[in-house]
Amino acid sequence: MTRRCDVLVIGAGLAGMACALELPSRMSVILLSKVRLPAGSTCLAQGGLAAPVAPDDSIDLHIADTVAAGGDLVDRAVARRIISSGPALVEKLRSWGVPLEGTDNGLGGMEGGHSRRRVLHHTDRTGRWISENLAGLCRTRPNIEIMEGAFAINLITGPPGAEGSGDIPGHRCLGAYVLMGGEVHTFLSGETVIATGGAGKVYRYTSNDDWATGDGIAMAWRAGLPVRNMEFFQFHPTCLFHPERRNFLVTEALRGEGAVLLNLRGERFMERYDPAQMELAPRDVVARAIDSEMKRLGDDHVLLDARSLGRKRLEERFPEVTENVSALGILPWEEPIPVVPAAHYCVGGVVAGVDGETGMPGLRVIGEASSTGLHGANRLGSNSLLEAGVMGMEAARVIAEKGAEPPTRTVGDWYFGRATPLEESVLIDHAWAAIRSTMWDYVGIIRTDRRLRRALRILEVIDAEIDEDYWRLIPDVELLELRNLSTTARIIVLSALSRRESRGLHYNLDCREPVNPPRDTIIRN
Ligand code: FAD
Ligand code: SIN
């Protein structure tokens, strides 16, 4: 089946839905999500959305904090554009039925690296609140068709015709092949927007959901687009440490309200790592401190002590955390919560402008899958919902101005050749586990050249095997996700090997000092 639309949005997190909602009603929009809505990391966000709206705050202060966290790699012009659009995004969310707490009274949440209380939230269920409301609104719009369980496999690209070409010689994006109900469909669009989120599943332990397999980054890589700074993977300092619930986040906003970190001897160890900022130091500092403390004492976790907040405040302000940990028998008003760092946010991504523009005409990349330069070498907490929302709005504004019509040409259907169904799931399961263990053991919070080189050798073998399977098997979601996961892992390692210094989230024991002037890592297929 071939479907045509003006704009194809791949991904229905905040970035994709903000874009779809902002497009004019005259444009036909297809919004794809590989899982049912509400979906994506957006839905899991606890802390909130950072925006400079409090009376004691300013755009300049928010930029200064973003730059300070970003290891001298933040693009200041981009930061100014995104942060100055924060108040308009907050207003837009309100008009979409999502008023955020802290907007009117200067009582936003506090997180590491922020000098003001600017994290606007809805208790600690901010993301769910945004996702459910925006998905509900998208469903009411006659020009938006939502397709759930629709998995974008590859971009369709072709010679440009009259439309002009970008820096991929002679190519323009024409749409995507999409797996739906066991069949591969051809979607042709005037403009294609990748909004597929992050890639936390490349690591064994992560705050991300299972679907976060770097699909959009891998798709763009295969199409020849450049990716930037993929070595910077942010580890969240405090994910729950519990055998039954390994990927549950315990929000940093708790530390903003006074929760403290303790080692298993009961010592407040941040005193030794960052006595000035303590638990509210930027995430790279806190995650490395926890890692080092666990290694020093031979422990497999540390503790987050939130008892000082008291039961009432915990239940009212942090119901998501309180209910989830209580369900496991941990009463956070009576005892500290066991926590451990886990992979959380993909700082790098496909090189894109604030409006998602890429080097390929007809293709935009927005949200976590993109790299605008806002985060530099380390993302300031709660700046990603801001970036995702602003990029979605900006992409829509520019698409509306320029116009978008589906290509009239015909494009060949997906060719199955002699592909056969997968018969041995162990091939997928083993490769999946091997990639994630390799990344966790060799490409984690602390890296060395030897570990990185070993990781690359292992990943290259796995990648070649997956590639073989890809060409001989009928595509299914597990195989496609595995292929994307493998590509993304390899991109991370290649990027990490090419950075001969330690900066922000990339810490290599074989080259500990930063090298100036700072530079971005940009690589392509
Ligand atoms: P997502 O919200 O991740 O959405 C991705 C969408 O793409 C989904 O609909 C998915 O189904 C779809 N998709 C993916 N691949 C395909 C494919 N191949 N075909 C079709 N569809 C596809 N940031 C903050 O600023 N503040 C916070 O408080 C915060 N808390 C967080 C808590 C957790 C636990 C996590 C994991 C992240 C948190 N972040 C937070 C980060 C932030 O949530 C994300 O960066 C942001 O939501 C990304 O939005 P997005 O629209 O780019 O992608
Ligand atoms: C958190 O609530 O701790 C996560 C915030 C973020 O990742 O921005």
Image (spheres, helix red, strand yellow):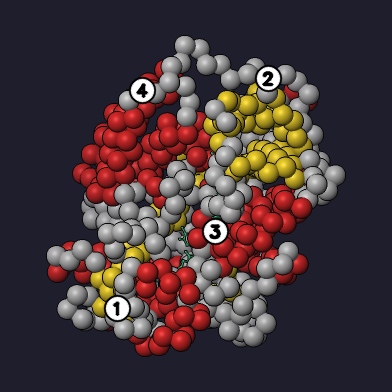
Residue at the image point whose x is 60% and y is 28% from the top: 177
- Give me the C-alpha separation between circle 3 and circle 2: 35 Å
- For badge 4, the amino acid type reads Glu
Quadrant assignment, res 247: bottom left
Report the disc number at residue 423.
Answer: 4
- Give me the C-alpha separation between circle 4 and circle 2: 31 Å
- For badge 3, the amino acid type reads Cys
Point out the tag, 3 or 1, that comes first from the N-terminus. 3
Q: Disc 4, disc 2: CB below 8 Å?
A: no
Please name which of the two marks, 4 or 1, marks the residue nearer to the observer: 4
Point out the tag, 1 or 2, that comes first from the N-terminus. 1
Badge 3 is on which residue? 43
Compared with 130, 311 (above or below) is: below
Point out the tag, 3 or 2, that comes first from the N-terminus. 3
> In x, y percent, where is residue 4?
74, 30
Badge 2 is on which residue? 411
> In x, y percent, where is residue 229?
45, 49
Circle 2 SS class? loop
Give the crowd class for mark 2: few <14, some 14-19, many >=20 residues within 10 Å: some
Residue at the image point whose x is 19% and y is 75% from the top: 264
- Give me the C-alpha separation between circle 3 and circle 1: 26 Å
Q: Disc 3, disc 2: CB below 8 Å?
A: no
